Amino acid sequence: MARTLSSPGSGQRDQNRLLLIATRRSFTLIVYALLIALAFSMIFPYLWMLANSFKSRTDFFTNPYSVIPMPPTLSTYYDALTIGRMGVYLGNSILYAAVVLIVQLFIDSLAAYSFARVDFPGRETLFLAVLATLMLPGSVTLIPTFLIAHGLGLTNTFTGVVLPGFAGAFGIFLLRQFFLNIPRELEDAARIDGSGFFGTYWRIMLPLAKPAMVTLGVFIFLNEWSSFVWPLIILSDWKKYPVTVGIALFRDVNQINWPAVFAGSTIVSFPIVILFVLAQEYIIGGISLSGLKG
Amino acid sequence: MTTLAQPSQPVQSRASRQRELWKRVRKTWPGYLFISPAGLLITVFSYIAIIFSLYISFYQYDIISEARPFEGLENYTRALNDKLVRISFRNTFIYVIVIVPSITIISLLLAVLGNQVRRGRALFRTVFFIPTITPIVVTSMLWVWLYEPTGGINKLLELVNIEGPNWLFNPSTALPAIMIMTIWGAVGYYMIIFLAGLAEIPEVFYEAAKVDGAGRWHTFWSITIPLLRNSLIFAFVTLTIAAFQVFTQVFIMTQGGPMNSTQTVQMVVYHYAFQRFQMGYASAISWMLFGVIFFFSALQLKLFISRELY
């Protein structure tokens, strides 16, 4: 096709251009309509969850799809916290997530620093051995991990829940990439000043790696907060359940009390929403990175 | 001190090479110390675990009784003839074959379309991401409610005069229902992967295509798709691996029912391992699943990489 350099006076061409603009506009409109419709489909279920969590049972049964509770009630949250024991689960989940977050960040970053900067013999082979575990499907390691934890006497204990999450191959990989990109001169200066390996890691590298640490930290937290299968298997006492297992149990025994279940679900989701609002750029940046690396 | 070995010396004796190595180890030993916590955990929970899993797959192994007789391939042959295992593999295959391409195509389209609009792109990205960060347990429970006979989904279908089924209690609609929810929940994540990939494509390619008079469609196929190769491989491979191991949605929404129509391999592994305590047998099934996952991942990588030059 010849390119249309519009010359004034050619009516046919002007009409073509108008048509082109019109199709482009309508295309944009269709795109917007589609995206907005999809966006609604993504928001609405959660909006319903939130709205229904404030509805009395009669209000829920008569108007399950209204987004405004009439009148709003907090008794659902009371039910979720008392009958549903969501308060206990919430405390457990916060503890699990916090412990795994802190310990894994430390262990991963220490290993990552070593793999990036300490030139010990066998480094490449050992790093490959760490990376290779990323290929292992969790489905194969689930049973032996349980049996090992059982053998160590960790079934139904807090330690049993958190221990397998204390190191992550993905975290080591991510942080190593980051450390490799930090200019060597910065730590050379520290080495000359007499810092050992650990001093360099702790005083120079860790502060510099803050963005990567935050990104990884957010992922560790999200993962631990949502984790379901492992705590389900390793725990047998409800007093130790995290929110995910707890809410599932609550629904199982409370199928008719949807509003209270929704109140519980809202409690489970709330910390995630806060984290997402605060750290959205880190989350999206981290996910984008993983795709580009692949 | 052991500084006799000269680096310039072309052929080093074995002894001096060993001395060199020892010198390096002495200088860098904290390196080993730093990787040891991670190394220990990964050794125990990945390497020892996987060897242990393979080992017990040849035994009759439960945590209660002390007797653990060797069974050879018995667990594997039993699995091949186990109706439940067969059904679960069939369902899992259907699940993978449907959701992997669906999620890839839909999220790719969303990314390409989202990239075209100027206003509100960040907002769309945020909204599409909500299902991804919400714990899958919560989303699954929410959809149990939406899938009720008079639930939100059927109310929507009513608007276009379709009488919706009792989604999760009908053997022919339960698995599709789970698949629809999973697709809906995952597209936002992969959209972000693809948006990042799109941002990496230099604008000049599109300008060149415009100069050549290439249409939207042609540009999409000959520029966008080939240059998104890395993101596409990542999406396809990670999705396949994850989809083969689907568990939580099924566990919450249907428990494998009705009439085993939503039994997946991981559900069956869970059933044998943690409800009937047949750890050896369950391990054998999980190894069969591992084999399938490995085969398909290798196949995909091979297919993608052989087209590298294109």
Image: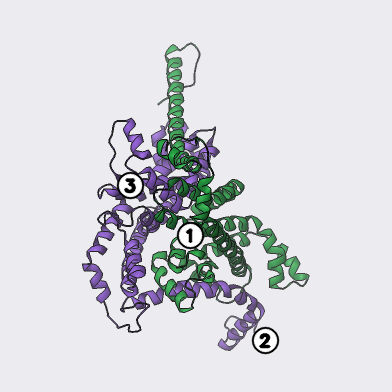
Q: Which marked residue is nearer to the observer: mark 2 or mark 3?
A: 3
Label 1: state its secondary structure. Answer: loop
Label 2 vs label 3: CA separation? 73 Å
Task: Tell which of A188 and B31 is nearer to you.
Answer: B31
- The chain letter corresponding to green is A
Mark 2 is surrounded, within 10 Å at the Cα level, by few (under 14), some (14 to 19) or many (20 or more) other residues, namely few
Same chain letter for marks 2 and 3? yes
Indicate the secondary structure of the residue bearing disc 3.
helix
Co-location on one chain, circles 1 and 3: no
**Marks 1 and 2 belong to one chain:** no
Disc 2 element: loop
Q: Is residue A29 above or below residue B124?
A: above
Question: Would you name the residue on which mark 2 appears?
Answer: B4
Q: Which residue in the structure is indicated by mark 1?
A: A227
State the purple chain.
Answer: B
Residue type of the residue flagged with mark 2: Leu
Quarter of the view holding residue A105: bottom right
The relative height of residue A177 versus residue B7 in the rendered view (above or below) is above
Expressed as whole percent of the image width and height from the top left, the position of residue B108 reads 42, 43
Is the residue marked by circle 3 packed among few (<14), some (14-19), or many (20+) residues within 10 Å? some
Cα distance in 3D space between marks 1 and 3:
23 Å
In the rendering, at what x and y percent does residue B280 appear? 33, 75
Quarter that holds the N terminus of chain B: bottom right
Residue A261 visible, this orientation = yes
Residue B177, disc: 3
Q: Residue at (33%, 47%) from the top-left corner?
A: B177
